[in-house]
Amino acid sequence: MPFAHSGKRITPYIWLLLAVLIPLLSVYGRSLQRVVKTAMPAGGLALFFVTLSLLLLAALTAWFRAQGRSGQIWHLAWLIPLFLLLPLTLPLVEERLHFVVFGGFGFFSMLLFSPPVAVLVSLAASGLDEALQWALPDRVGDWRDVGFNVIASLGGATAAFFGGRK
């Protein structure tokens, strides 16, 4: 299984990328948001997030199969509503980014650390991200966003837990 072997080597790098991306998005998020909204209409941005979510769910399905866990594909029954349908209900398109970034962070945390540590790291990142935004002059931390972060990171961690355990 070359996919599984190379995946284990790249996991820490993807986790680190997400760990750096989270505070960077907090610090530079408003500027980036203005650039993206100027360059892309809201419908295009919504389509981008739906497409990205579908691609990530397809990659997760392939990962389950590569792990020899095809029997665990039934987890899509809760992953699709959590990572595709719930984000579609959010009034602000950019709120969908929480599910992509924190879902990925929780997923790779579970692959990298023991389950208790992965959950603790995911919860800490979920809260610290918004605490950072409370400290920034042009951002506002929001308990609702903490909730999105927690739900997404625990959902990603749960998917990794069930897909990766033997």
Image (cartoon, rainbow, N blue to C red):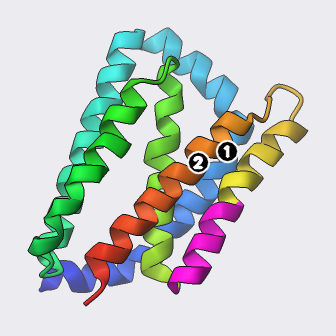
Q: Is residue 15 magenta?
A: no
Up the image or down, 74 lies above or below 5; here it is above
The crowd level at tag 1 (other Cα within 10 Å; few <14, some 14-19, many 20+) is many
Residue named by callout 2:
149
Give, as a three-letter code, the residue at label 2.
Answer: Asn
Q: Which SS type dominates the magenta stretch?
A: helix
The residue tagged 1 is: 146
Question: Toward the viewer: 68 or 27?
Answer: 68
Q: Residue furthest bottom?
A: 166
Q: Is 97 placed left or right of 28 in the picture?
A: left
The quadrant where residue 108 appears: bottom left
Q: Residues within 10 Å of mark 2 (few under 14, many from 20)?
A: many
| Residue occupying image coordinates x 56% and y 42% | 148
Q: Is residue 70 above or below residue 147?
A: below
Mark 1 vs mark 2, CA separation in Å:
5 Å
Q: Please, what is the three-letter code of the amino acid marked with disc 1?
A: Val
Q: Where's the C terminus, which quadrant?
A: bottom left
Residue 128, percent across and down? Answer: 76, 54
Magenta segment, which residues? 114-124
Element under disc 2: helix
Q: Nearer the viewer, residue 6 or 121?
A: 121
Q: Are marks 1 and 2 in contact (CB under 8 Å)?
A: yes
Q: Is residue 56 visible?
A: no
Q: Position of residue 158 (x, y in %)?
A: 40, 67
Quadrant containing the N terminus is bottom left
Q: Mark 1: which secondary structure?
A: helix
**Residue displayed at 59% across by 53% down:** 150
> Is residue 38 in view from this perspective?
yes
Give the vertical position of 137 relative to 7 (above or below): above
Q: Is residue 63 above or below residue 76?
A: below
Q: Position of residue 126 (x, y in %)?
A: 66, 54
